[in-house]
Image (cartoon, rainbow, N blue to C red):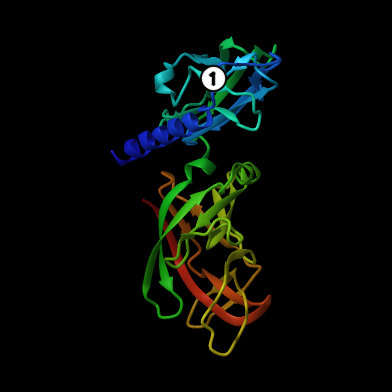
Amino acid sequence: MKSNMKFFKYILAAVLAAGVLNSCEEGTTGAGDATVGFASTTYSYSEAAGMVRIPVTVAGEPAHAPATFDVTATSVSGEDMSDLVLFTQTTGFKYQGNPENQVYVEFQIVCDDDIINEASRFFTLTITNADGIEILPGQETTTVEIRDNDNNPYERLWGNWTLTGTSVSDGSTVSFSVNISGGFSDEEIAGNADKTLVCWGFNGYQEDVSGQVEPGHQPVWYIDYDAATSGLSIQVGTMMANIFSFNIPDISASTYELMTASLYVPDDSSGFDSYTQIDGTWSEDMNTITFDPDYGLCAVIYADGNYTGYYWAGVNNIVMTRN
């Protein structure tokens, strides 16, 4: 119920926003050289992508304002369209003559499931019923691919997990939430595809500070992915987070950085380094990730770019369980 409510609220917001953008006075006449077409002939999304916005390229001055057009969706792979996606809008798209007011075809992918579909699913979007604007030849149609994410272990590892382990400082059991994804932007997801998993949350700390510091979500750590061996390894020596202030009594600094490090704890002794990867693997049902118990993950502290000799938190015997 909550997810449906969020979805309908999103649609309402989108409709209200569209109403604001298209509230200019109608009935004006212009040069009539406006054009419309899809920016690309193909688009591809994972079935887990959620809400998708496909841009429509508009340019020139319409013969009258607003120029309007519709978009027709047709299944190519045989499914009913309602089983694939739900559209925010398919008719009455408006263009007032300002190309900076981007027009999108927006839809929610609803076919995400746990079934392994070897083949992708496809549908086409076609611009039709244009009034006051010319449809560009060759750009009137785009083909949308919906890729299955259940036959790719990389994407099947995405989601919310609970990390459980042993605190290196006092031996207590610790547990906190971690979100695994391909990244926080389309560009990052594309760059990480089938190579790197992005883990958001460490030691119970998970906060979105996008636009304030890098990385936008912190604390973030990374796992290298190897499909051939069903193997994973936590990256060390990478930036986890920037902290504006930190309580270290004998060190004064303007900024503090948390860097990932490997913590070796096979017995009562311990030591950490920034080059030993922490190896692990996933279970056959992909609901459990287990890492080498002799190695833990910790966040070492740098003050104004200099290593302080301190670490913020360390945990070994790491097991992650899907929520």
**Position above or below: 238 against 245:** above
Classify residue 26 by image quadrant: top right
Q: Going by the picture, which residue comes out furthest to the bottom? A: 250
Q: Residue at x 65, y 79 (%)?
A: 307
Q: Residue at x 55, y 21 (%)?
A: 94
Q: Going by the picture, which residue comes out furthest to the left? A: 1
Would residue 223 be found to the left or right of residue 178 on screen?
right
Amino acid at circle 1: Glu
Would residue 130 be found to the left or right of residue 6 on screen?
right
Q: Nearer the viewer, residue 267 or 199?
A: 199
Which residue lies under the disc numbered 1?
Answer: 26
Classify residue 138 by image quadrant: top right
Q: Nearer the viewer, residue 78 or 136?
A: 136
Is residue 170 in sight in this rendering? yes
Query: x, y percentage for residue 163?
Result: 42, 60
**Position above or below: 270 against 41:** below
**Position above or below: 75 against 110:** above
Q: Nearer the viewer, residue 158 or 13?
A: 13
Q: Residue at x 47, y 70 (%)?
A: 315
**Regarding mark 1 in the picture, which secondary structure is present there?**
loop
Query: x, y percentage for residue 272?
Result: 59, 76
Q: Residue at x 38, y 65 (%)?
A: 175
Is residue 113 in sight in this rendering? no
Would residue 18 be found to the left or right of residue 133 on screen?
left
